[in-house]
Image (cartoon, grey):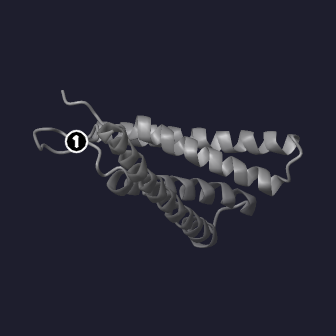
Amino acid sequence: MLRDRLWQLIDWLHGFRFVRFGLVGASGTVVNLTVLFIAHEMLFSAIEPAGSKPYFSLLLAILVATVNNFTWNRLWTWSDRRHATARADGQRLRKRSLLAQLGQYATASWLGILLQYGLTIGFMHLGLHYLLANLIAIAIASISNFITNDLWTFRNQRKP
């Protein structure tokens, strides 16, 4: 009985983690759009031909938003986890481990993007309106992205 209640409590608390994950994702969208606008309108305004400008702007926006989301997810969403970059002896963070975790996060994000793309196309072929298909795909990909990051990128590290 106590064990069941404990698992219920853990599941309930875990739901808040998903909300934090969603809020970080929303902030990443704002960062992405802001950087995209600034890069396109100001930073890369001199790039010729003008048709090349969006590629550079979008690349920078995605990079900055990914680092933003990784940072906030690490500091807030999964702040209770002992990360691979934390050392038991209190020494400095190891850059290699932090970069490896960022790489895992980026991989999980790209897998989520591919899943969203594939599901949207698949649902459209089943006859769903493209906006509804994309909305469903975003929900599924977000859950998948959260689970992947929870179990892989930000998993609890075992003590050496």
Residue 108 percent across, percent down from the top left: 52, 39
> Number of numbered discs present?
1
Residue reaching furthest to the front = 1
Answer with left or right where residue 139 lies relative to residue 34.
Answer: right
Eyeballing the image, is 31 above or below 104? below
Q: Does the rendering let one see residue 106?
A: no
Answer with left or right where residue 160 lies relative to residue 71.
Answer: left
Q: Residue at x 48, y 58 (%)?
A: 19
Q: Quadrant of the N terminus?
A: top left
Residue 139 percent across, percent down from the top left: 64, 50
Q: Residue at x 43, y 41 (%)?
A: 150
On the image, numbered disc 1 is attached to which residue? 86
Q: Residue at x 18, y 39 (%)?
A: 87
Question: Closer to the camera, 23 or 111?
Answer: 23
Question: Could you classify mark 1 by the number of other residues whose Cα lies within 10 Å: few (under 14), some (14-19), or many (20 or more)?
Answer: some
Res 101 quadrant in image: top left
Instruction: Give amino acid for label 1.
Output: Ala
